[in-house]
């Protein structure tokens, strides 16, 4: 029986700002153990029995970042396939596109295991057992959800009501899905014992889920098929990719898989789980991953405390001191600091909304930005100038490009740079430089075996990242 984990990596995680941003969302956050949520999800999926490949549905701008993360996880012999979205379109679109593509590749009997990229599961053995139970039900035609046995009356999750009399092989028939309850209702759900947290994970037979889409959400299915028909099939690096075209994908209804299918179908079952699950939805959940000191403080980085209690501090790059405060969340990044009361951890998303309204880049980018070829860090900027630190990975190269409004001065700090500068082809070493005038075609490449580090000084009337014309690009971005 073929099992294909489908990792859905589309959420921004606005409640985890300032670490989570649109170009560096929650799945890429590094946890206290040094791993990311996305890396943990990939490793967990790859270790399951019967897995023949792993599919990922994500934003096309995050493809190379995702691939870099997967390479750190190993499993080089396990095929990887990607569906790349031009923008987020909710979970029904992602599941429908994935199911249609898997039917074309593996046939209708294949099983798809839908996993969120940003969930934490501590008991992987129990998770594997739950997947085995769900696979049996899915092979029999059930749309299977993973229901988490509630540990306390949580008001931030949706719930699944199971039918105690509807016993199946390893699970129960689902009576209904219910929205996030108030506290009194959540306490009642906990006491009654037949309500589960809705984890947002599913095990589905490809043919069965497509039949249910055709019956209950044909508009989603038909639009998803049209989006796949218009997709650009290619192979980036060594992975099979489908890049969805913007206009056709926009026609797919923006609806969750729960609303589109699970709440309408009579073929839904749930496997109750105790797998150490958390959706890591706030800084309170992140703080629980760090051990507390005797005063209840949980700290990451160099932190000094005086008469401070029950605080969470994440400050990896500079000294942070707290004096006489309690129940605070303090998160320090190079370009933004968050200070919030623990009881208001869910409200961080409102800060992100304000940043978007103001057009402030802090909701979108970190000071250090990942690119397929490496990273750049903005060190300083002002009127008509910007200074960056650029790191190019060994063997990587930037596109052959041109800028209309800015000139650039490159100084090599370490490593070796091969530079195309208009008609010149240069090899630059440490402390050597070149000046690139506006309008000149240029390319930067690292021909060495260590990172190339250089300082770039930009000057001109306009210094935006969109002032770039690409002529050639090994990462498929020419013309963008």
Image (spheres, helix red, strand yellow):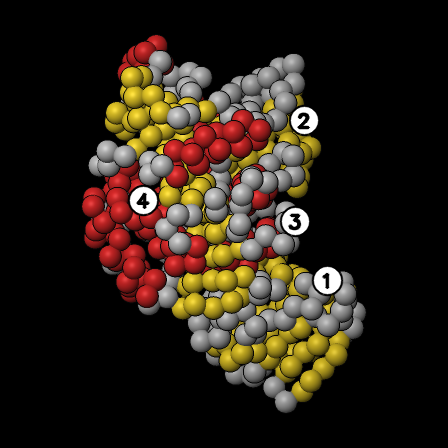
Residue 208 — which label? 4
Lateral position of residue 268 relative to residue 78, left or right: left
Closer to the camera in the image, 416 or 62? 62
Q: CA distance from mark 2 to mark 3?
A: 38 Å
Is label 4 in a helix, a strand or a loop?
helix
Whether pointer 2 and pointer 3 mark residues with C-beta atoms closer than 8 Å, the reply is no
Residue 471, image x, y percentages: 51, 80
Closer to the camera in the image, 52 or 450? 52
Label 1, on which residue? 451
Residue 101, image x, y percentages: 39, 57
Whether pointer 1 and pointer 4 mark residues with C-beta atoms closer than 8 Å, the reply is no
Residue 339 shows in the view: no
- In front of the other: label 3 or label 1? 3
Q: In the rendered structure, which disc, 2 or 3, sits on the residue that comes first in sequence?
A: 3
Q: In the rendered structure, which disc, 2 or 1, sits on the residue that comes first in sequence?
A: 2
- In front of the other: label 2 or label 1? 1
Q: CA distance from mark 3 to mark 1?
A: 22 Å
Label 3, on which residue? 74
- Residue reaching furthest to the bottom: 423
Is label 1 in a helix, a strand or a loop?
loop
Label 2, on which residue? 304
Q: Residue at x 20, y 46 (%)?
A: 215
Q: CA distance from mark 4 to mark 3?
A: 32 Å
Q: In the rendered structure, which disc, 4 or 2, sits on the residue that comes first in sequence?
A: 4
Q: Residue at x 63, y 89 (%)?
A: 423
């Amino acid at each position: 029986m073929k099992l294909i984990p489908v990792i859905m990596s589309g959420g921004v995680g606005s409640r985890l700002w300032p670490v989570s941003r649109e170009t560096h969302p929650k799945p890429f956050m590094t946890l206290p153990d040094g791993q990311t949520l996305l890396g943990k999800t990939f490793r967990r999926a790859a270790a399951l029995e019967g897995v023949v490949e792993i599919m990922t549905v994500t934003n096309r701008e995050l493809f190379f970042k995702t691939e870099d993360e997967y390479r750190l996880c190993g499993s080089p012999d396990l095929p990887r396939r990607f569906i790349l979205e031009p923008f987020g379109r909710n979970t029904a679109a992602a599941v429908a596109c994935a199911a249609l593509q898997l039917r074309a590749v593996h046939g209708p009997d294949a099983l798809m295991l839908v996993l969120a990229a940003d969930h934490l599961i501590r008991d992987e053995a129990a998770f594997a057992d739950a997947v085995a139970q769900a696979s049996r039900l899915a092979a029999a035609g059930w749309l299977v959800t993973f229901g988490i046995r509630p540990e306390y009356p949580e008001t931030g999750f949706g719930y699944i009501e199971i039918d105690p009399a509807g016993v199946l092989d390893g699970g129960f028939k689902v009576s209904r899905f219910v929205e996030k309850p108030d506290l009194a209702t959540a306490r009642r759900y906990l006491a009654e014992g037949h309500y589960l947290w809705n984890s947002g994970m599913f095990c589905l037979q490809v043919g069965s889920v497509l039949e249910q889409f055709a019956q209950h959400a044909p508009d989603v299915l038909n639009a998803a098929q049209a989006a796949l028909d218009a997709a650009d099939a290619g192979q980036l690096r060594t992975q099979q990719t489908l890049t969805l075209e913007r206009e056709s994908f926009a026609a797919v209804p923006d609806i969750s898989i729960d609303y589109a299918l699970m709440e309408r179908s009579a073929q839904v079952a749930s496997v109750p789980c105790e797998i150490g699950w958390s959706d890591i939805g706030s800084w309170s959940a992140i703080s629980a991953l760090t051990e507390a000191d005797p005063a209840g403080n949980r700290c990451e980085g160099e932190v000094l405390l005086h008469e401070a209690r029950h605080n969470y501090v994440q400050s990896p790059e500079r000294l942070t001191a707290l004096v006489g405060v309690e129940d605070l969340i303090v998160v320090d990044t190079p370009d933004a600091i968050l200070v919030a009361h623990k009881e208001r951890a869910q409200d961080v998303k409102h800060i992100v909304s304000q940043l978007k309204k103001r057009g402030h880049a802090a909701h979108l980018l970190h000071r250090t930005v990942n690119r397929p070829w490496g990273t750049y860090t903005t060190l300083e900027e002002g009127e008509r100038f910007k200074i960056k630190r650029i790191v190019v990975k060994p063997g990587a190269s930037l596109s052959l490009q041109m800028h209309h409004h800015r000139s650039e001065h490159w100084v090599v700090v370490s490593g070796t740079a091969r530079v195309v500068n208009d008609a010149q082809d240069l090899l630059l070493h440490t402390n050597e430089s070149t000046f690139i005038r506006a309008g000149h075609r240029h390319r930067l490449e690292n021909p060495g075996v260590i990172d190339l580090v250089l300082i770039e000084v930009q000057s001109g009337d306009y210094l935006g990242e969109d002032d770039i014309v690409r002529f050639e690009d090994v990462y498929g971005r020419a013309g963008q």
